[in-house]
Image (cartoon, rainbow, N blue to C red):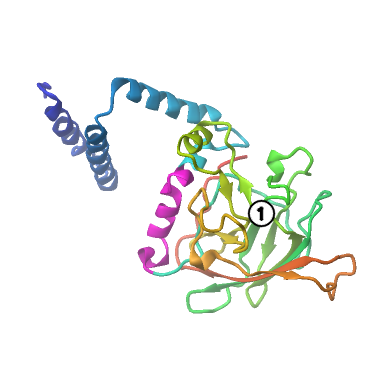
């Protein structure tokens, strides 16, 4: 088709997209072109703005490496990640779900830890945290033998791969649920932290007068054949940014009860007050068990 005017561009592209053999890819590409061309017309995108946008996409790719994923940060900062999550879980977004964002810091092959063990592998000052959790299906039955990856930021707001002062795999561990679907471990109480702001996402937040903070949270990734892999984050409701997470990840179902204790711990003589405890129930949905692609190495 020879293009005579700007109105001809979209029909010409859509005609090509219609010839895509794969039906799902055809559906996605037709919708993408329709909305993308509509956006360009709606904001009357200038040539300079288009070139800037292309340069930004290139920069995001160049900024992503073994320890950082700028694209994942951007997807969360625009609310795309939480929207995709909620659309695909909890009965298509109609019910509460334990699913949440994977985030940019999950790593494969976390060290195995026995239930009740510690995931602290280097000197990590901060109040002790004792987690007791249970994994169940939607009918309330225990999910036995599930593999549970847990990880979280340190009390200074860094994951171990961001911080040379932390040992490799500090505050990470892999557990197996027992006959009642339970797992437990000891760690240190995490804090909220700013997402990396030395790239494209940081410039966007600054231009929008937005803060870069995520509320304190505990990550988990739970794998069991016969179930959809559960990716979850449990948030501390006392964090000052619980209502305005920069990544829009906080849902009602993901707010935990991090209890602050001022009395001595009954079973750990080395623990000084205050210390914290968290009891939480993760709910898995039936489905195909497929691990996500790690965002970092």
Work out which quarter of the rendered image holds the C terminus and state it: top right
Q: How many numbered dots are placed on residues in this image?
A: 1
Write the residue at 41% across / 48% down: 80
Image quarter of residue 113: bottom right
Q: Nearer the viewer, residue 51 or 30?
A: 51
Q: Which residue is mark 1?
A: 151
Q: Is residue 220 above or below residue 193?
A: below
Q: Secondary structure at mark 1?
A: strand
Mark 1, residues whose alpha carbon is within 10 Å: few (<14), some, or many (≥20)?
A: many
Magenta segment boundaries in residue numbering: 75-94
Q: Height in image: 163 above or below 7?
A: below
- Percent coordinates x, y for residue 199 in the rendering: 54, 31
Give residue 266's quadrant in the image.
Answer: bottom right
Residue pictured at 51% horizontal, 35% vertical? 206
Question: Whole-percent x and y of residue 175?
Answer: 69, 62
Q: Is residue 294 left or right of residue 275?
A: left
Q: Main secondary structure of the magenta part?
A: helix
Is 85 included in the stretch rendered in magenta?
A: yes
Q: Is residue 154 left or right of residue 273?
A: left
Magenta span includes 44: no
Whether residue 107 can be seen here: no
Q: Is residue 125 left or right of residue 43?
A: right
């Amino acid at each position: 088709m020879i293009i005579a005017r700007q109105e001809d561009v979209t029909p010409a592209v859509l005609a090509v997209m219609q010839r895509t053999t794969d039906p799902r890819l055809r559906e996605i590409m037709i919708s993408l072109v329709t909305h993308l061309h509509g956006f360009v017309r709606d904001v009357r995108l200038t040539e300079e703005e288009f070139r800037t946008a292309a340069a930004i996409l290139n920069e995001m790719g160049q900024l992503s490496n073994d320890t950082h994923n700028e694209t994942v940060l951007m997807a969360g900062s625009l609310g795309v990640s939480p929207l995709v999550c909620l659309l695909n879980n909890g009965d298509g977004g109609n019910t509460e779900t334990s699913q949440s964002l994977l985030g940019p810091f999950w790593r494969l092959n976390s060290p195995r830890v026995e239930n009740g063990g510690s995931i602290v592998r280097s000197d990590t000052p901060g109040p002790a945290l004792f987690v007791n959790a249970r994994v169940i299906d939607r009918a309330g039955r225990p999910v036995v033998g599930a593999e549970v990856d847990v990880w979280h930021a340190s009390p200074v707001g860094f994951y171990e791969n961001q911080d040379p002062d932390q040992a490799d795999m500090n505050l990470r561990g892999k557990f197996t649920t027992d006959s009642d679907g339970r797992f437990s471990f000891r760690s240190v109480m995490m804090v909220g932290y700013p997402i990396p702001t030395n790239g494209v996402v940081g410039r966007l937040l600054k231009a929008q007068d937005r803060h870069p903070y995520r509320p304190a949270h505990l990550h988990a990734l739970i794998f069991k054949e016969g179930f959809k892999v559960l990716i979850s984050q449990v948030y501390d409701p006392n964090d000052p940014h619980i209502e305005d997470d920069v990544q829009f990840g906080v849902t009602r179902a993901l707010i935990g009860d991090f209890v602050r204790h001022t009395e001595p711990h009954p079973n750990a003589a080395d623990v000084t007050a205050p210390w914290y405890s968290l009891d939480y129930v993760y709910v898995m949905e039936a489905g195909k068990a497929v691990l996500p692609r790690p965002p970092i190495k």
